[in-house]
Image (tube, grey):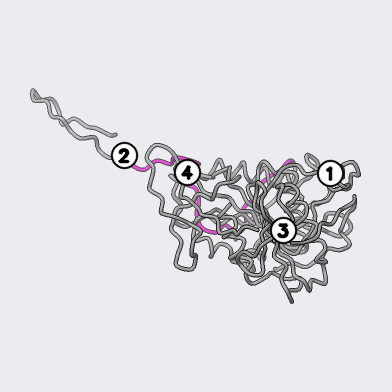
Amino acid sequence: MHTSGLSFIAFWGATISSSIVGSIAACETEPHDASAWNSQQDAAPDASVTGASARNPSDVQGQSAPNDSARSDAGASTTQVNRAPLPEAPKPLCGSASPRVGVQSAVSITVGSAKRSFVLSVPSNYNPAFRYPLVFGFHGDGGNGANYRSAFPIETRSGNQAIFVWPNGTNNHSQYNHSFDQANSPPNNPDVRLFDAIVESLAATYCVDSSRVYAHGFSGGAYFVNQLGRWRSSALRAIAPMSGGGPYSTVGSDYSGPGGALATTGPLAAFIVHGQNDGVVALSEGEIARVYWRNAAGAFENRSSTLPSPCERHAGGTKAVVFCSVPSLGHTLWGESARGVWDFFAAN
């Protein structure tokens, strides 16, 4: 994790000018499929298309990452009394009866024979009458979910309107010790299995809108997000890779698209961020992601400015594709990323 906005339960503050409309009324019979969201994306003018070939770009990736109706009758009587039904106690309309809320710093889950963990953040005002979007954050190589959560304040921006998942990678994939497996296609990818298992588990415990699952990542986590988007395009609604690259394949036959480009599996809304001064993952790697998702969406090459500056959105296409090439930014999180990513997810 496609074209409508997120469902959420609070209204936006004054800091957000036009992303969200309205507040959500409680629903008594079934979980409510939430508020209307307005896209902030502009239409599109410019750029160049670069092809790709079968490869493993591990040599261009960094190892660093920013481091959670009851009724009672009062005895027999000859007089019939009509009583209004007493109000029932609130019932969980979705998920389990009394799930934990707040931040859980070490949630364990068994995937196959492997024990994995993640940080889980559930709004303190969680309401089982509403379906919440699910937002995954994949950290860079050598990092962990807690540190990435601390470095990337997207939860603050969201205003308690989503459930956030911060998986912990194993930092042992390939000779480059990638946090998440970028190379092996499903079903042989343990981190894709982790993603699938977490979605299934949380949907059973909380009121999750399975049509609104999102993923963002930094560096090695961004590479994985691009791969996950290609492998799970039907399960994701939008992605936001930052300072990464891909998707790619080590199988030559996968490059069967026009001009030998990587064949697309399905469109996704994509918000791609890359620093022009990134000395760890070259800007050209971010361009590969931009071209792939532009091709997948069937968008035009011309782009126009959108927020936050200096981001640009491709014209047309079935999904929004935004590329933010940030001057002077190195291999680090951009200060506008949390705002940009959340607002993009909200609009898509």
| Crowd rating for badge 4 (residues with CA inside 10 Å; few <14, some 14–19, many 20+) | some
Distance (Cα) linking label 4 and label 1? 37 Å
Asked whether the beta carbons under mark 2 and mark 1 sit within 8 Å of each other, the answer is: no
Residue mark closest to the camera, 2 vs 1: 1
Q: Does label 2 or label 1 sit earlier along the sequence?
A: 2
Please give the range of residues in magenta: 88-112
Number of dots carrying numbers: 4
**Crowd band around label 3 with a 10 angstrom C-alpha radius: few (<14), some (14–19), many (20+):** some
| Callout 4–callout 3 Cβ contact below 8 Å | no
Question: Dot 2 corresponds to which residue?
Answer: 88
* Residue contact between numbered discs 3 and 2, judged by CB atoms under 8 Å: no
Q: What residue is pinned by disc 3?
A: 302
The amino acid pointed to by label 4 is Asp
Find residue 193 and report its image quarter: top right
Above-or-below relation of 128 to 151? above
Q: Magenta span has 200? A: no
The secondary structure type at the circle numbered 2 is loop
Residue 184 picture location, percent across and down: 83, 46
For label 1, the crowd category at 10 Å Cα-Cα, with few meaning under 14, some 14 to 19 and many 20 or more, is few
